[in-house]
Amino acid sequence: MEKEKFQIRDLRNSDWYWIQREIYENYIPKIGIIGLALYNAYASYSRNEGKCFPSQGLIVKKLKISIPTIIKYNKILEQNGLIKIESGKKKGIVNIISLLKTKGIKQVKTPSKPGLDQGIKQVKTESEAIESKAKKEIVIVKQGFTGKDINDLIKLFKPINPTYERLFANKTQREALERLVKKFGKEKVENMIKSLPKIFGKPYAPRITTPYLLEQKLADLIAYIQQERSKPKKGIIIRENA
């Protein structure tokens, strides 16, 4: 039996486009899956030019979402500095969407001649990389916090998150833990996570299964715990016979 033949995509061809890896890794919690799909569509239409002007009707047809949804997520993308919307009414065309360079990332243009490079590289500027490394080292020194400590905290999510292993390689989740430890200390963050299985599934309890959700819903968690503590404890009432 002959082996099944398949073809590997060739990035040197003109039938492809690209978006920065940072959009997928760092912006999904901010823009959501619909925002990512919309940004992806704009990247497809703009190709390497950085600008496009698809009609809302075309987006509705392609993504199967409503016009109000498009307007909503356009604002979210714009507020997060990913796109700029220019009104096309004066020019007699639809709105012009410009894809913006994300902060702190130096874009490397695709090679003009095929074969020189088959990928697109994105690198931080040298000064930003040094500054970022220095800040992380300062935090580690102050908190005595290491990568192993992050892993130990992530393991505590196992009772409430069957797929907790995926959190280890997730940059967004690890950075959320770093921020929490920097603000509250490792011991308090550890106690926060250990309290989650005790309230998991209880009525009105915030649903927290990841470090990022813990950071976002910390105020709800504190309010819930305080409310539970303030409730009168149930006891046995003994009445005397008349």
Image (cartoon, rainbow, N blue to C red):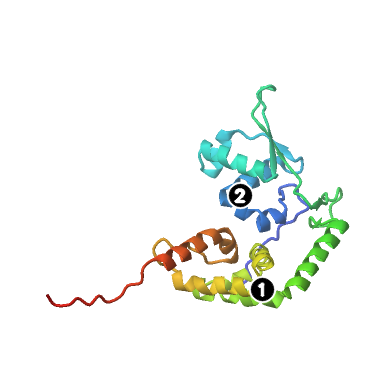
Image quadrant assignment for residue 77: top right
Q: Give the residue drawn at x 50%, y 70%.
A: 196
**Residue 212: numbered disc:** none
Quadrant of residue 228 within the rendered picture: bottom left
Q: Amino acid at mark 1?
A: Ile
Residue beneath disc 1? 150
Answer with left or right where residue 188 lies relative to residue 198.
right
Does residue 47 appear in this view? yes
First of labels 1, 2 by sequence position: 2
Residue 31's disc number? 2
Relative to 241, 43 lies left or right = right
Q: x%, y% of residue 226?
A: 47, 64
Residues 25 and 15: in front is: 25
Around disc 1, counting alpha carbons within 10 Å, would you say few (fewer than 14), some (14 to 19), or many (20 or more)? some
* Disc 1 element: helix
Is residue 36 depicted above or below 69 in this figure?
below
The residue furthest front is 242
Residue at the location (68% across, 40% down)? 45
Please state which of residues 220 and 78 is positioned toward the viewer in this rendering. 220
Give the amino acid at mark 2. Ile
Look at the image and tell me in which quarter the N terminus lies: bottom right
Estimate how packed mark 2 is, as few (under 14), some (14 to 19) or many (20 or more) residues with alpha carbons within 10 Å.
Answer: many
Per the image, label 2 sits on a secondary structure element best described as: helix
Q: Is residue 5 visible?
A: no
Give the distance between the C-alpha atoms of the residues marked 1 and 2, in whole angstroms. Answer: 26 Å
Q: Position of residue 69 (x, y in %)?
A: 53, 40
Q: Residue furthest left?
A: 242
In this rendering, is residue 158 above or below 19? below
The image position of residue 111, as x and y in percent, is 85, 51
The quarter in which the C terminus is drawn is bottom left
- Tell me if residue 94 comes above or below residue 191 in the rendering: above
Residue 74 image-quadrant placement: top right
